Image: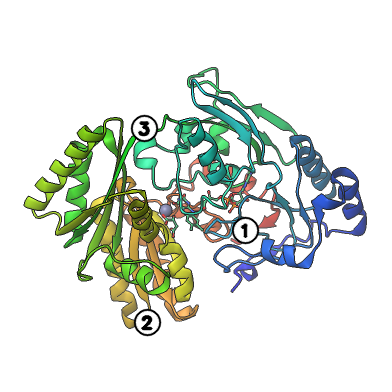
Amino acid sequence: GSEATKFERNAAFSTLNSEDVSYFKELLGEKSVIQDEDVLLAANEDWMRKYRGSSKLLLQPRTTNEVSQILKYCNSRLLAVVPQGGNTGLVGGSVPVFDEVIINMGSMNNLITFDKGSGVLVCEAGCILENLVSFVDDHGFIMPLDLGAKGSCQIGGNVSTNAGGLRLVRYGSLHGNILGLEAVLANGDVIDMLGTLRKDNTGYDLKHLFIGSEGSLGIVTKVSIHTPPKLSSVNLAFLACKDYFSCQKLLREAKRKLGEILSAFEFLDNQSMDLVLTYLEGVRNPFSSSMHNFYVLIETTGSEESYDREKLEAFLLSSMEGGLISDGVIAQDINQASSFWRIREGIAEALMKAGAVYKYDLSLPVEKMYDLVEKMRQRLGETAKVIGYGHLGDGNLHLNISAPRYDDMIFAQIEPYVYEWTSEHRGSISAEHGLGLMKANKIFYSKSPKTPIVRIFLVTRWALRRFDLPG
Ligand code: FAD
Ligand code: MLT
Ligand code: ZN
């Protein structure tokens, strides 16, 4: 169900009227001013079907100037807005809470420049990640980020959530890969930070404030991103481990022994595997036995086929001899590699098919991470399935609780326990998905209320959205 009831709409802000709609039609043309009920129904609801707003208007600007004019007008009329990319966000940030005007970035999807020497790509914020992947691939480059939602999410949405994903362990976060941005502030002012340089220490680097700010400071309209060269040899191993301790040790060993070629290190427990095998069509278990407790995916990317393969095989052999791995398969071709990735990337989808899902995205010390999954199992007993998976190489756990339906009794066993436990272990309650509506008022579990930036966040967070946080 919708969580909007927990928040009060701020009555000081206006309600859309027919003059507003006429203004937008004049500005953008009829086609970009959408009042169609079916389109609005979809745009009001998030990917998880958990958060639902009641917006009556969706705007699709095509240029930065149009975004600027829209925001300037909404600011003067005190109309609340919500920026929307591919609407794949998992924390209820991409849909209206009440009746905000949806500013959908999908029509700003042009490539601007690509430098084949440096690999610097400049494009509009509404470009779909997968389209950028194909474009740079044709020129021998790769995008430094990869996530299961690539077919729908937009680069502007990725920047605004500081999306992590499957390659962060190798290429680092978007704070390192984004070279520049253009953004429009709530009052319509355009800020040009669209540099293309790797190094530029002339004063404050403002773009970093926009990376991960979830639309709270403005709308990102253009992005400049460094794309690394595509290397010729990629290997993927699907491994089984008897316990979580072995997964941890395997990670430590992989960082030392695969070092420069390691490009992904992901894990899932057998409850995650079960869920995927039960709910996703056409997915097969790569192992003959289904009795393994944990699985790890290790990808290597390098430039020398035989050297990389030898290195990976030697690593797997020593890990097997050392008892860290109980079984393993190396993908023999690209199709098998895709089928392995499908298992890991399909967990979110399988959870949706299984029923209600409580989703937590935590940064925790790797040694402690799985304790929380076990603690949660003890708390919930038979009432719900608790599954753990995630980006182990980055210390990022996806703790998910799957139940037949949303239930207050279950919820009371999960929160605030999950946040308190994370805070006690000096973790983060939002590793890569953002705070959104789900965690807007939970920031204190990860950031000290004494930090000035937290106070600034609480004031600016809702500058565009214009509803009041409780408490
Ligand atoms: P949206 O969902 O539309 O918006 C997300 C937030 O950004 C909202 O607050 C919105 O207001 C704001 N926003 C969007 N565009 C702009 C803009 N141009 N300017 C300002 N604000 C904007 N996330 C990860 O980090 N790692 C993963 O591995 C990962 N895997 C996923 C797998 C699946 C199957 C799904 C459904 C989601 C996954 N996500 C993951 C979460 C999500 O895809 C990412 O957060 C993604 O970056 C969101 O992009 P989007 O274009 O869909 O943004
Ligand atoms: C993932 O890593 O699969 C995504 O972040 C989605 C999720 O957490 O379910
Ligand atoms: Zn993730």
Residue drawn at 79 percent across, 52 percent down: 79
Occupied quadrant, residue 370: bottom left
| Spatial CA span between label 1 and label 2 | 32 Å
Q: Which mark is residue 469?
A: 1
Q: Nearer the viewer, residue 317 or 271?
A: 317
Question: Sequence-wise, which precedes: disc 1 or disc 3?
Answer: 3
Instruction: Report x, y in % for residue 405.
Output: 49, 80
Residue drawn at 45 percent across, 36 percent down: 142
Q: Quadrant of ligand 2?
A: bottom left
Occupied quadrant, residue 180: top right
Question: Sequence-wise, which precedes: disc 1 or disc 2?
Answer: 2
Q: Nearer the viewer, residue 468 or 37?
A: 37
Residue at the left extreme, as displayed: 321
| Spatial CA span between label 3 and label 2 | 47 Å
- In the rendered image, is residue 295 in sight? yes
- Looking at the rendered image, the quarter that the C terminus falls into is bottom right
Instruction: Report x, y in % for residue 290.
Output: 23, 70
Left/right placement of residue 51 relative to residue 166 reads right
Q: Nearer the viewer, residue 335 or 422?
A: 335
Task: Name the kind of residue labelled 2 in the image.
Answer: Thr
Residue drawn at 34 percent across, 77 percent down: 380
Occupied quadrant, residue 263: top left
What residue does disc 2 label?
Answer: 383
Q: Is residue 232 above or below residue 265?
A: above
Q: Is residue 58 above or below residue 293?
A: above
What residue does disc 3 label?
Answer: 231
